Structure formats: structure tokens, C-alpha cells
Amino acid sequence: MEESQSAKPRGRSDLHVVMVIQRFRPYFSGQGVQLEELARALVRRGARVTVIAAVRGEDAPNVEHRDGVSVHRLRCDLFGRANSAWSRRLWSPTFALRTFFHLLGSGARPDLIHVHGANDALHAAWALGRLFGVPALFEMTLMGVDDPETVRTSRNRLASLRYAVYRRFTGYVAMSPALAEAYRAAGLPEAKLRMIPQGVDVERYHPARDRRALRRELGVADERAVFVFLGSLIQRKGVDVLLSAWERIHRENPAAELWLVGRDRFEDEPAAEQFLQRRLESIPAAALASVRRLGVRDDPERLLQAADVFLFPSRREGFGTAIIEAMACALPCVVAALPGITDYIFAAPEAGGAESGVVVPQEDAEAFAVAGLAMLADPARASAMGVAARERARSRFSMERIAEEYLAWYGALVGSRDRS
């Protein structure tokens, strides 16, 4: 990394941004995927992006350069075996210390440090920002985890210290109106906040050019209905509600399939593994036989393009990127209500316009099933919804537009620090 020229005003397109995230490739996280897409878009606009992430053992190379993005993985299982309880407990504080000394010893001063989510590295990022004299930006990623009230009332022994640091960041990003409202409710300064939603690569996620051929490649008959879910198979994502709804859908349409796309192995999280296994075993064998667990994929867009209906019963999100990925593929979506998120993603259509998605009440498996089946029963409505969804994703949530919004906010923060 090269030394920044502190005396020279920084343009939007030549910023050096350090992104700090604990869970990143090869470990799956939705925020990690989003960060990587954003980093590439920023690089295409001339920015330099360095990602600082944690790694255990030899899971991935320490340094990697891909698509113009530099990734530095810091080994954080220094105490005991990589998957021991002791090592897991020290994972976050070790990452914070290693982040601090890694950047301090690199000889480089970035123009801005961007922290994704609440972990102990937020202390390191804030301290480095102060030491380097550069802005530190905190991005809220999940309600109930890193919104101000949750951080303030955490049971963590150092919660008061964490919140004191949290309140002192130069700027903040809320990825949804829900998180923005939580920020305002905490009484934090409005001038430090920008609401920037997550984005989708609309060139990658698009309607299938030859859907029949794609389905043949995936081994799906033309007449078979396919419902798809994209996300980790955990309780927060409402997988139990999804499987309850699937029992009803399967009774009505025994030939249909449900594709579960996302993380479905939790060796280091026994409770999550037990939850998933118990719930899968609780549904009738015939319904279970029509469920395909496809795991984490490098090509989720192909599965969305081949499916008929997207189902997303998540109980809590920061945004819900999977929804806009499905929308960009022109897939009709049925989702559980997430106030301040789903009402924003599915903006009310103009007079005479088609709806861009269907929202049903939380925890209502029956309503979820009925809405999903209604998409199959009314192909014209489903098609019009898919077209409207694609247009909404393209016009508001394109990653190219989101990258421009981040660059504008970065530039404002760097400019304000230069003037102070």
C-alpha cells in the first residue's frame, strides 16, 4: 500500500478506502458478498480498496488480489485449536488487535476506514482514524445486532465502552429506513447519517435469456413448478415458517420443488445445526423429498432465473439483499413483512402500474403458502410482477448507483475532515 498525500484534496475517484469486516471469503456472510460487489464497483470508478478480514488457520491465503481489490486476511485463531470454544471466544478481540497493528505497521494512511458491522474491530478502526486523522465510517448491517439501541444495551461486559466508541464515528450508513430510524431514535446526529441501500449487479442478475434451456441444464422439467429461497438456513431467516408453508404448497402441488440455496452446514454452531435438522425431520417424508438443499453456490443467479417464485420469510434483516437479487431476475417475490425494509424495497406502484412484490404477515405460514400458490395460479400477474420487480431493482438498487452514493458520502466525509 502506498502513502496517501494528506496535503492534497482527494477526488471522489482516487480515494483509498480500507474496508474492515470480520467474516469474509472463504466464510459465507451476506454482508461479505455485498462488500465484495461494492468494492469491485468502487475500483471500476478509480478508487483503491483494501479489505481487512479474519481467517482461521490455513483456510485461505493471507493476501489476495482479485478484480483490483486487495484482501488481507489476519489469522485470529492464535489461542488453542481453530474451532475450540476458547479460540472462538477470542476471535473478535484478536481480530481487533491484529487489525490495529496490521494497519499501523503497513506504513500507509488510507483516506477513509469503513467498518461493516459491530465487532471488536470497530474500536481499532476508530482509534486508527483518530491516529491517522482520517474519517472512520460505521455501517449498520442488521437490526438487533448493530443498531444503536442493541449496541447500547448489549450484555457484553464492555458494552458501555463499545457504545462510547460507536457514538464517536465520523459517519454512519444505514442500509434501510428501519436502521436509519433506529439511529435517529437513539438521538445520534442526523448530519452524520446517510441511508444507502444494498445493491445488486443487474448485469449478473437478470432474467434468463433462454429459460427452458437453463432449466434443462439444471434437470428441471418445463412443467414442474420451482419455489426458491436464498439465504442461510437459520431461525432468523424463518426457515421453520418456510417449511411449514411448504407442507401446504406440496399438498396442493405435489410435483413442485423447493430449492434451498445458501449456507446449510453449521459445524461451528451446534444450536443452528440442531434447529435445521429438527425442522427438516418434522415435515412429512413426501414433502421433504421435494426439497433440494443446494448449499452455498457461486451461481445463485442461475437458480433464481430458473425458478417460478421466490419465497423469503425472514424475521429480521438489515436490508434483505436476496430479495433484490430475485427481483433483478424478474422473479415474483413473496416475503414476510419487515417494516422499514419491505415497504421500501417494494415501493407502491404508480397508478395503473404492476406491484413489484407480495408482502405477507410475519409468522403466517398459511398466508405465505396461499400467496405462493397464487403466483402459480395467475401467470399473467406473476409475469407483470416480475417485470415491475426487475425495473425497480434496475432503477433503484443497481450496484453502479449504490457505488456512486458511497463515493459521494466518502467524499463528503473526507472533505469535511480536510477542512477541519
Image (cartoon, rainbow, N blue to C red):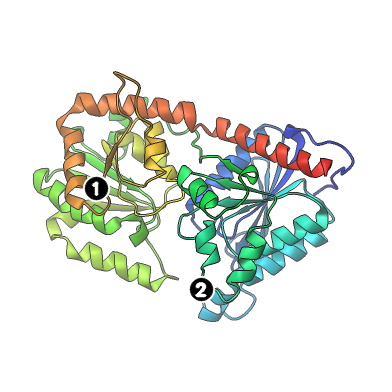
**What kind of residue is marked 2?**
Arg
Which residue is under mark 1? 258
Residue 233: x, y in percent?
35, 58
Residue count near mark 1 (Cα–Cα under 10 Å), binned few <14, some 14–19, many ≥20? many
Q: Residue at x 54, y 55 (%)?
A: 186
Q: In the visual, does 25 lie left or right of 410?
A: left
Please state which of residues 99 and 68 is positioned toward the viewer in this rendering: 99
> What residue type is disc 1 on?
Leu
Can I make out residue 207 in this image? no
Q: Secondary structure at mark 2?
A: loop
| Residue sticking out furthest to the left | 251
Residue at x 26%, y 40% (from the top left corner): 219
Is residue 219 in sight in this rendering?
yes
Q: Dividing the picture into quarters, in which one does residue 75 lie?
A: bottom right
**Real-space CA distance between mark 2 and mark 1, rounded to the nearest whole angstrom:** 38 Å
> How far across and how far down the image is residue 23, in percent?
55, 59
Seen at 17% across and 36% down, the residue is: 374
Note whether 10 is above or below 170 in the view shown. Answer: above
Q: Earlier in the sequence, mark 2 or mark 1?
A: 2
Residue named by callout 2: 155
**x and y, in percent, of residue 327 in the image:** 38, 34
Mark on residue 18? Answer: none
Label 2 Cα neighbours within 10 Å, binned few <14 / some 14-19 / many ≥20: few
Residue at left offset 47%, top offset 33%: 204
Question: Which residue in the rendered view is the most extreme toward the right?
Answer: 7
Residue 109's x, y, as percent? Answer: 81, 51
Judge from the rendering whether residue 279 lies leftward or rightward of residue 112; answer left or right.
left
- The quadrant of the rendering that contains the C terminus is top right
Q: Indicate left or right for 378 with 131 as reference.
A: left
